Image (cartoon, helix red, strand yellow):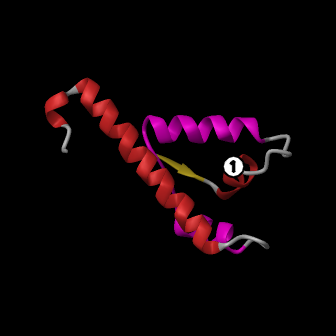
Amino acid sequence: MKLLDTMPIVYARTPASPFHSWPVQQIATAVSTEGAALNTVSLAELCSEDGVDSAGVGGAVFALAALRAKTHSRFLAKARPDAVLR
């Protein structure tokens, strides 16, 4: 599992950033393979930005978790079909 820092998340959601491509690739790889997480400090920093709906940040985190679970389930189905809980 990779722990995501605040700034790569900010760069990933800012297409105009010159640093946009790298964090998007890193986050996508982490979510689809080993998993990704963020700590409460990073979550609070993301929620406190001007113009950010904190409920939306929570929803985005939940969506990432759901994507992770779905991806992990597909991985398990290929690796060990008997290990997948339905």
**Which residue is nearer to you in this view: 81 or 12?**
81
Looking at numbered disc 1 in the image, what kind of residue is underneath it?
A: Pro
Q: In this rendering, would 21 be left or right of 86?
A: right
Task: Give the vertical position of 37 relative to 1 (above or below).
Answer: below
Which residue is located at x 20 percent, y 27 percent? Answer: 80
Q: Which residue is mark 1?
A: 8
Q: In this rendering, would 79 be left or right of 26?
A: left
- Quarter of the image for the N terminus: give it: top left
**Which residue is nearer to you in this view: 23 or 73?**
73
Q: In this rendering, would 63 be left or right of 78?
A: right
Q: Which residues are the magenta region?
A: 20-48
Task: Give the vertical position of 83 relative to 39 (above or below).
Answer: above
Q: In this rendering, would 86 be left or right of 17?
A: left
**Rendered location of residue 47, percent (x, y):** 65, 71
Which residue is located at x 50 percent, y 51 percent? Answer: 64
**Rendered location of residue 46, percent (x, y):** 67, 66
- Quarter of the image for the C terminus: give it: top left
- The quarter holding residue 79 reads top left
Does the magenta portion include 39? yes
Does the magenta portion include 26? yes
Number of numbered discs on residues:
1
Which residue is located at x 42 percent, y 38 percent? Answer: 34
**Rendered location of residue 60, percent (x, y):** 56, 59
Which residue is located at x 36 percent, y 46 percent? Answer: 69
Magenta: main secondary structure: helix
